Amino acid sequence: MAFDSGVDIVLYHLETVDSTNAYAKANIARLPDGTLVTAGCQTAGRGRMGRCWVSPAGRNFYGSLVMKRLERPLAGTMAISLGALLALRKLAPSLPVWLKWPNDLYVGEAKLAGVLSETVAMADGRRAVIAGIGVNLNLTAAELSAIDRPATSVLATAGVEINPDFFASVLAESVKSYYSIGIYSEVALFSQWRAANRIVGLEIELEVGGSVIRGVAAGIADDGALLIRDASGKEKPYYCGDATIRRTSLQNLAKILQNDNH
Ligand code: BTN
């Protein structure tokens, strides 16, 4: 199924760095295409919307994939998210992990991983995509409770401890085919990402620009926007925001995920 476009994913490990995304951007000229920059810990891990990303040493995975043959941040998000989903399914098959539009991996109603995709200009004027991902692997319940939003880890939900270096090698293998597909056809990558997203059909609240939109996630449009249907039946596209699943919908999601795993 994978299209072999000659992509090689090469691991480049740093013990400590401010942020793997910042490092990849600053060193774009010398990092080969397909480099997965990983770190033991980050001193200034960055999340979306200016948030910080909790990055203690040796407990989680922090990495940024350099993709010089993609141009749109969304394409990078799709490749790394699908790669991480596959890696987690290989390493912790019982984990009911799901992809939540636009940038997250969730277990139940808690965040397991987040993606920050950025672009950087190269010397020839083209742009490269840097897709950063943080995956909570071994944070304990006490460590998770110190995070200001509902968060979980593989250890806390599946009871499985995963070495971050081992996760890096499995992710490198898993993301390779998705990066190849993206190079070959962003449309093909998009259709896999859209199919893997489990938000569609759920009742949600979307926090965007200081207001909250309530409705049903009716679908994901071809340009990546989330379509939300309000109580009057009107659908509108949204391009970013924090989606919270309404309690009533979580049980439906649990059933969908159970079917996924069988
Ligand atoms: C989010 O959910 O807000 C995105 C979090 C992205 C965190 C990762 S960790 C590796 C990479 N380096 C960073 O500084 N951020 C991303």
Image (cartoon, rainbow, N blue to C red):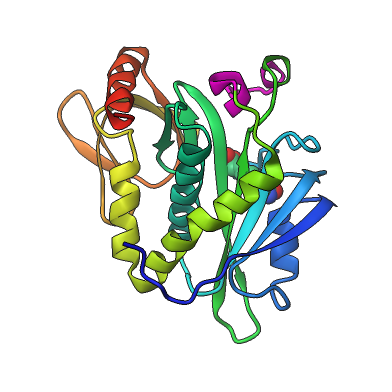
In the depicted structure, whether residue 22 falls above or below residue 54: below
| Residue at horizontal 54 percent and vertical 29 percent from the top | 111
Give the left or right position of residue 100, taking residue 137 as reference: left
Relative image position of residue 35 (x, y in whole percent): 64, 66
Relative image position of residue 61 (x, y in whole percent): 67, 42
Question: Does residue 250 appear in this view?
Answer: yes
| Residue at horizontal 46 percent and vertical 42 percent from the top | 85
Q: Nearer the viewer, residue 42 or 209?
A: 42
Q: Quadrant of residue 86?
A: top left
Residue lying furthest left in this view?
A: 233
Question: Does residue 104 appear in this view?
Answer: no
Marks counted in the figure total 0
Q: Does 5 lie within the magenta span?
A: no
Relative image position of residue 196 (x, y in whole percent): 33, 42
Give the left or right position of residue 187, taking residue 25 as reference: left
Q: Which residues are magenta?
A: 144-159
Give the left or right position of residue 117, taking residue 253 as reference: right
* Quadrant of the snapshot with the N terminus: bottom left
Relative image position of residue 171 (x, y in whole percent): 56, 51
* Quadrant of the snapshot with the C terminus: top left
Q: Quadrant of residue 136?
A: top right
| Residue at horizontal 75 percent and vertical 61 percent from the top | 23
Q: Nearer the viewer, residue 103 or 180?
A: 180
Q: Nearer the viewer, residue 1 or 118?
A: 1
